[in-house]
């Protein structure tokens, strides 16, 4: 009997006005899966969004699957006739027209009322309304002290506006809405953004498989992989990647770095994003003309590229080097000042965000990437497919993979002078040399064409469908077994962690990862432990972490020992010991080894007393 095809649902936080790389990659993936016969749809979680308006904008996007649905989670909540078995405490909804309350409308109906901290954007209460005016959800953010942020209560109301359920966070409401929307049908849920992924790793249902697609750097900006601090905004999610049924990275290097930092997992796979159809290249390009597609933010470091163009024009004035930058963002004003200060008003232009901006690659001779980090570098791949030759800083992740065909165009991170010389050298080279480079990048870009990646996405979804229904832990809140003893031995070269657990003889050995976590300096590191049986109902888990893996060594004075006990959906991450001084050498021992000896001695005494009686 063939496996039924699951619904493929991409859960997004919102759809930005100017669709960027992550949203574009999610749309392209869904389009590829739709071509393979899967039913693809989108759920948007952010409030204050109009589903019809989002659909109208997305329908014009070249990668949007024809006939796909966009559903807003708050519309699911509003349209469901919720029932509750027990009454819950009632929060007063915000009255219409009250002072300090903002209203948001769709089609003439009030759908959201919001109360903020005075003269602030901090929300104190947000009520979600149905089209008929009844209250669907009362979301309080000031339950500890009314009028002061702190404490949350999310109250779900039935279609009569009366409360039926209440929670202390928003995630259970999201889960209830998804349960209602998906029912018992098999489904594969994709979570692309870090916001929705934090919910996705907690949503576990037997008929639903979850996939997190990593689009960006998982490390703190400026830190070098693989063993560095996690990005604070992504740390909660990265620490518990094992909760997803699959994790997809864009490059093999990022997959390996994640494995080195938070333990290897067979659920992590690599599928790069697919690029769109290349624009038809112009027969003649201006040799010195460059085009860049990027958001105008600090991470992109476009000021580096502007300074590189200025130097390149001095090195090769005959090449007439120019640059058009397509994009929008907060750094626009500072970039204009940079252009003016460099005297490049006629040579470098900020063109703003254009939906068809990538067509400029067909006219340009070169492009540049000067970001602090990338998830892949999709704009570079798009440029390559149009025969536009890239120059890029060697940063994680993507440039090294994309420029294997032209390694000389990979520039040391931050070396503006080297970047300028490479641009000048290319622009002033002979046309046959430039044409050879263009042919090389076009060939390399073939690996990222949709036809090459469509089947890989289809296989991933089909594999997950074949595993449904999935086993769900009986209690997601049940803690993992705590170590009966924990021994740490620190030397100049390594940290040895050894834990013992009570474990029935007849049960199979569990999977255990052991490691350390700390805030100052920030670190997160764990690795699979060697697990073996001990006499009696005990097992031992041991892991040795080499200090040289971290540039500054293991120097945290207030670290914690962390474990991941078990495998798959039933695995749990636990802090098992706190206050460890990693900077000092020596050994530490905690646990109940001494207690066990005391208990045995007490038993012997009691047994001897019984015998005398």
Image (cartoon, helix red, strand yellow):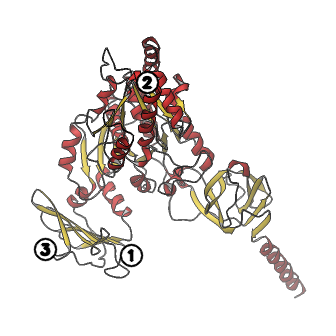
Name the secondary structure under disc 2.
Answer: helix
Q: Is residue 410 above or below residue 606?
A: above
Q: Whole-Å distance between the Cαs marked 3 and 2?
A: 57 Å
The image shows residue 470 at horizontal and vertical percentages of 47, 48
Q: Residue at x 51, y 56 (%)?
A: 235
Q: Mark 3 points at which residue?
A: 97
Residue topped by disc 1: 150
Distance of label 1 from label 3 (alpha carbons): 25 Å
The C terminus lies in quadrant: bottom right
Tell me if residue 91 comes above or below residue 307 in the rendering. Answer: below
Comparing 282 with 584, the one in front is 282
Earlier-in-chain disc, 3 versus 2: 3
Q: In which quarter of the image is residue 443?
A: top left
Q: Are marks 1 and 3 in contact (CB under 8 Å)?
A: no
Callout 1: helix, strand or loop?
loop
Q: Are marks 3 and 2 in contact (CB under 8 Å)?
A: no
Mark 2 or mark 1, earlier in chain: 1
Q: Which of 157 and 83 is in front in this view?
A: 157
Residue on which disc 2 sits? 445
Residue at x 29%, y 45% (from the top left corner): 42
């Amino acid at each position: 009997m063939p496996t039924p095809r699951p619904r493929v649902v991409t859960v997004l936080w919102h759809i930005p006005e100017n669709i960027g790389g992550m949203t574009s990659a999610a749309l392209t993936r869904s389009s590829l899966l739709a071509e393979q016969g899967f039913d693809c749809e989108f759920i948007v979680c952010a409030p204050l969004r109009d589903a019809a308006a989002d659909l109208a904008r997305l329908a014009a996007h070249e990668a949007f699957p024809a006939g796909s649905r966009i559903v807003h989670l708050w519309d699911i909540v509003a349209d469901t006739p919720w029932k509750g078995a027990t009454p819950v405490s009632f929060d007063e909804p915000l009255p219409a027209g009250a002072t300090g309350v903002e209203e948001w409308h769709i089609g003439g109906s009030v759908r959201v009322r919001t109360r903020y901290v005075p003269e602030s954007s901090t929300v104190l209460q947000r009520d979600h309304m149905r089209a008929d005016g009844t209250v669907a959800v009362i979301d309080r953010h000031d339950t500890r002290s009314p009028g002061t942020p702190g404490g949350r209560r999310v109250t779900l109301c039935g279609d009569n506006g009366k409360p039926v359920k209440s929670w202390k966070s928003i995630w259970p409401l999201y889960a209830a809405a998804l349960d209602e929307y998906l029912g018992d049908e098999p489904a594969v849920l994709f979570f692309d953004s870090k916001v929705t992924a934090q919910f996705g790793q907690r949503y576990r249902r037997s008929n639903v498989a979850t996939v997190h697609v990593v689009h960006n750097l998982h490390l703190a900006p400026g830190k070098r992989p693989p063993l560095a601090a996690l990005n604070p905004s992504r740390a909660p999610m990265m620490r518990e990647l094992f909760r997803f049924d699959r994790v997809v990275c864009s490059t093999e290097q990022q997959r390996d770095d994640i494995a080195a930092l938070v333990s290897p997992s067979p659920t992590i796979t690599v599928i790069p994003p697919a690029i769109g159809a290349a624009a038809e290249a112009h027969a003649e390009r201006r040799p010195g003309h460059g085009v860049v597609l990027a958001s105008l933010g600090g991470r992109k470091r476009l000021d580096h590229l502007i300074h590189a163009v200025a130097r390149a024009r001095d090195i090769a004035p005959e090449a007439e080097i120019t640059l058009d930058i397509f994009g929008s963002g907060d750094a626009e004003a500072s970039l204009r000042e940079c252009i003016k200060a460099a005297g490049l008003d006629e040579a470098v232009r900020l063109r703003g965000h254009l939906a068809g901006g990538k067509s400029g690659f067909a006219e340009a001779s070169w492009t540049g990437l000067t970001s602090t980090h990338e998830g892949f570098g999709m704009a570079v791949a798009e440029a390559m497919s149009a025969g536009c030759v890239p120059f890029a800083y060697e940063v994680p992740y993507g440039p090294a993979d994309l420029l294997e065909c032209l390694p000389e165009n990979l520039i040391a991170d931050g070396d503006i002078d080297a970047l300028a010389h490479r641009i000048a050298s290319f622009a002033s080279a002979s046309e046959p040399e430039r044409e050879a480079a263009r042919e090389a990048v076009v060939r390399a870009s073939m690996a990222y064409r949709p036809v090459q990646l469509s089947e890989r996405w289809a296989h991933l979804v089909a594999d997950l469908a074949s595993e449904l229904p999935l086993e769900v832990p009986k209690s997601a809140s049940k803690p993992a077994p705590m170590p009966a003893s924990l021994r740490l031995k620190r030397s100049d070269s390594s940290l040895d962690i050894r834990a013992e657990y009570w474990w029935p003889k007849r049960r199979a050995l569990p999977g255990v990862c052991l490691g350390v976590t700390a805030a100052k300096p920030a670190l997160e590191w764990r690795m699979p432990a060697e697990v073996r049986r001990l006499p009696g109902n005990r097992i031992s888990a041991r892991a040795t972490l080499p200090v040289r893996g971290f540039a500054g060594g293991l120097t945290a004075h207030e670290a914690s020992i962390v474990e991941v006990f078990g495998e798959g959906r039933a695995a749990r991450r636990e802090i098992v010991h706190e206050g460890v001084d990693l900077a000092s050498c020596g050994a530490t021992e905690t646990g109940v080894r001494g207690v066990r000896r005391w208990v045995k001695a007490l038993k012997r005494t009691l047994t001897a007393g019984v015998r005398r009686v």
